[in-house]
Image (tube, rainbow, N blue to C red):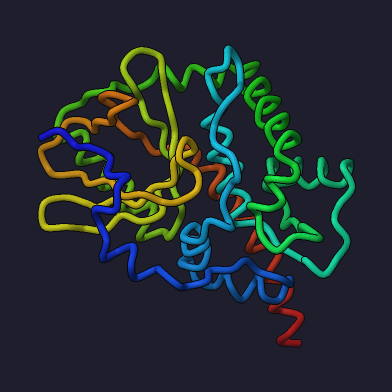
Amino acid sequence: MRNTLRYACIFVSLLTSYRGMAFNPSNSLRDFCTDRTTSEFTKDLTRNSDNLMSFRNYGGIGNGGVCWWHSRFQRNSLYLTIFRPDLKKPSTEEAIQIIKKLRAAKEVVTIPGFDHFVDFSRVHHDLIQAELEAWQIADGAKFAWIRGLKGSSVVTSDKLKTLMDELYREVEIRGNIAYQKLQIKGITAHAWLVVKVKPEDNGYLLEVLDSNYPRATNFYRYRYGNTHFTHRYYGDFTPYLEETKEMGRINSTIVSTCIPKKNVAKN
């Protein structure tokens, strides 16, 4: 059976459970460390559009988009930011440094003068887009584009089940927001973030954040026996888990930031 991405409100009961709930970012280092004692905090941030990118995937080399880097930057911003609306807004040069630090994902980044990421990314849209395009070029120089050639858009049902089980372990057992490359027919490859993988009797229900639809998460159903996913714009594709080392670096950054604080508190 062919899957179709359900961007309409098909899963109303799931969406309703989030309605009216304000999932807000951390406003101090103490809150940051407390908030991230549970993996659900960062995932819940995706359910408030104020915490998401203000603009969709576009631009890039040959105007082919920067979806890989848009998704990675979005994930970094969810995991590694503190917002201080009580402080003065950053200058252009300060904003550039904030954006570069978020790209690197090697430290927790304080964003002054803003309540949420959506406002920061709206005001500094051009700076972020420029950084995403520079990131794309830098990865291209390291032949990262070869990843777009790896994997098939249609696989065996056993292979897809293995990929989905691996995704479940990454998202639900390890508690991470997963980055997946979507291998489309030919050399084309897209990407999305997977926030939740809910087991069902005959497969999984995925909650995803797609850079082409960046203002809200949406749901996608995988059923045992499928050999691929299908999207009305992307066509047939298979998702592959990638950038797990980057996720490991994000987690290491959080641990190295917060564990010393806990030790100091105990002393």
In this picture, is 161 found above or below 23? above
Query: Residue at point 20% right, 33% down?
Result: 159
- Name the one closer to the observer, 30 or 106: 30
Query: Residue at point 42% right, 23% down?
Result: 189
Q: Position of residue 81 (x, y in %)?
A: 68, 58
Query: Residue at point 68% right, 32% down?
Result: 129
Q: How many marks?
A: 0
Q: Position of residue 101 (x, y in %)?
A: 75, 45
Quadrant including the N terminus? top left
Q: Is residue 94 left or right of residue 172?
A: right
Q: Position of residue 150 (x, y in %)?
A: 38, 20
Q: Quadrant of residue 25?
A: bottom right
In this picture, is 173 found above or below 58? below
Q: Position of residue 146 (x, y in %)?
A: 48, 17
Query: Residue at point 46% right, 67% down?
Result: 40
In this picture, is 124 found above or below 10? above
Quadrant including the C terminus? bottom right
In this picture, is 236 found above or below 220? above
Q: Residue furthest bottom?
A: 267
- Name the one closer to the observer, 11 or 167: 11
